[in-house]
Amino acid sequence: MNFEQLFKQISPEEISDNVFTLAGKDFYVVTAGKEEHYNSMVGSGGGFGLLLKKPTTWCFFRADRYTLELIEKEQTYTLSYFPKEYRKQMFFLGSKSGRDSEKMKEAELTSVVTPSGDMSFKEARLILECKLTAITTANPNDYYVQEDIDLINEAYNEAKVYRKLVFGKITHVWVRK
């Protein structure tokens, strides 16, 4: 089956999921690259809103993530949400780096190319295609709530690598038919 047989396009305003559930309780898969070479990782957290008058997503990445490297190179990526029965397969994508493994070939998910040439998976129930808008480094000195400052500082100390805040304009939204 081709992509259009599996998914139908909707507008960002037609997403029926609760955005706090999508960003806070549901895990998602971030995928960057093209069919010849792509990588995925599990994401959680982030958000949705309007940035520069455009529907936009944002998420935090460790600066050393291979997927982030591919996002910067290609300047597009997808966020894919799955039914709960695919949790094990999703978490496999977070179990090792794609920089030094063949995890995308080992993943028990079926890759699919969107009409725009971005990568996702046919098992997804919701796919957001995003165009990279901005990447900025989260600086603890820019936060004013002590709890948030502590969380950012803790993340830096544990990973010894800064967190990047990635903003992407939503270019297409696809839902499973």
Image (cartoon, grey):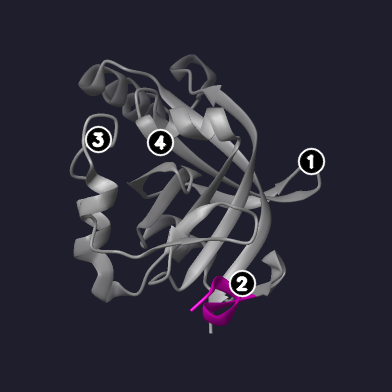
Confirm whether residue 93 shows in the render: no
Please state which of residues 18 and 7 is positioned toward the viewer in this rendering.
7
* Residue range (magenta): 1-8
Q: Is residue 160 left or right of residue 120?
A: left
Q: Which residue is mark 2?
A: 15
Q: CA distance from mark 2 to mark 1?
A: 20 Å
Q: Mark 2 packing: few (<14 Cα in 10 Å), some, or many (20+)?
A: few
Please state which of residues 31 and 102 is positioned toward the viewer in this rendering.
102
Please state which of residues 145 and 82 is positioned toward the viewer in this rendering.
82
Nearer the viewer's eye, disc 1 or disc 3?
3
Q: Amino acid at mark 4?
A: Thr
Where residue 52 is drawn, which disc sits there? 1
Q: Determine contact: label 2, label 1, CB under 8 Å.
A: no
Q: Determine contact: label 1, label 3, CB under 8 Å.
A: no
Q: Determine contact: label 2, label 3, CB under 8 Å.
A: no
Q: Mark 3 packing: few (<14 Cα in 10 Å), some, or many (20+)?
A: some
Q: CA distance from mark 1 to mark 3?
A: 33 Å
Q: Is residue 24 magenta?
A: no
If you read the primary sequence from the N terminus, does the residue marked by circle 2 or circle 3 appear first? Answer: 2
Confirm whether residue 81 shows in the render: yes
Residue at the spot x=29%, y=49% of the render?
A: 104
Nearer the viewer's eye, disc 2 or disc 3?
3
Q: Amino acid at mark 1?
A: Leu
Q: Which residue is mark 3?
A: 97
Residue at the spot x=40%, y=56% of the render?
A: 24
Q: CA distance from mark 3 to mark 4?
A: 9 Å
Give residue 110's position: percent from left, percent from top: 34, 65
Q: Amino acid at mark 2?
A: Ile
If you read the primary sequence from the N terminus, does the residue marked by circle 1 or circle 4 appear first? Answer: 1
Q: Mark 4 packing: few (<14 Cα in 10 Å), some, or many (20+)?
A: many
If you read the primary sequence from the N terminus, does the residue marked by circle 2 or circle 1 appear first? Answer: 2
Q: Is residue 150 left or right of residue 175?
A: left
